[in-house]
Image (cartoon, grey):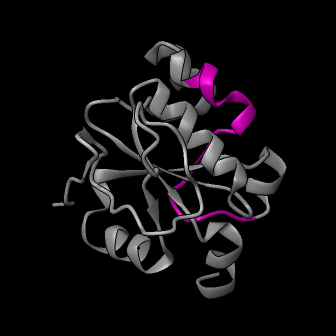
Amino acid sequence: MLPNLNCGGIEAGPFALPEGGRCAMEIRNMSRAPAMSLPELRSILATDRDRVRLIDVRSREESAAGSIPGALNIPVSELENALRMDSTDFQATYFAEKPIPEEENLVFFCQIGSNACHAMQTARELEYLGANYEDAYRAWQAKEG
C-alpha cells in the first residue's frame, strides 16, 4: 500500500513530496506538488501497479515513438476536457476506462517535465490524485528503454 502524505493539513495523496521538488503548484495553500523519481516509479510499478495509472501527456506522435509500458496517452492540450468527459465518451476517445478521482492515483509524464507539471495541476484542480514523474520520459528511455 502506498503511504498517504499530509501536506500542510491537506491530504496530498499516496506519493512522497520531495524537498526542493521541481514542480510547485497551489494546493489551496501553496504546498509542493507530489513528485516521483525513477526509483520510486520502478518500485510502485513492481509492487503496486494496480494502484496507479500512468498518463503520457506528450503529443500522439511523441507517444507513438515510444512510451512507458502501460501508459495511456492523453496530450496535455486534451487533458482537462478528457477528465471532464463522461465515462462512455472517454472510453470511445481513448480506448480505456476513465480514471476515477477517488480511486485512482495518476502519474503524469512528458518528455522533459514541464507539461507533466501542468497536467498534474489540471488534474488536481478536478480533484484527481496525482504525481509528476519528475525524471520524465527521456530518463526512462535512457535507463529502461
Quadrant of the rendered image containing residue 28:
top left
**Residue at image location 39% in from the left, 27% down from the top:** 127
Q: Is residue 126 above or below residue 53?
A: above
Q: Position of residue 33 (x, y in %)?
A: 46, 50
Q: Position of residue 66 (x, y in %)?
A: 72, 65
Quadrant of the rendered image containing residue 67:
bottom right
Q: Position of residue 27 (x, y in %)?
A: 43, 36
**Residue at image location 71% in from the left, 39% down from the top:** 75
Q: Is residue 96 above or below residue 136?
A: above
Closer-to-camera residue (78/64): 78
Closer-to-camera residue (35/38): 35
Quadrant the C terminus occupies: bottom right
Closer-to-camera residue (10/85): 10
Residue 16 relative to residue 66: left or right: left
Residue 16 relative to residue 93: left or right: left
Spot the residue most to the bottom. Answer: 143
Spot the residue most to the right. Answer: 61
**Residue at image location 44% in from the left, 29% down from the top:** 98
Q: Position of residue 54 (x, y in %)?
A: 49, 53
Q: Is residue 78 magenta?
A: yes
Q: Is residue 127 magenta?
A: no
Quadrant the N terminus occupies: bottom left
Which contiguous range is marked in magenta? 66-82
Q: Is residue 40 above or below residue 52?
A: below
How many numbered markers are drawn? 0
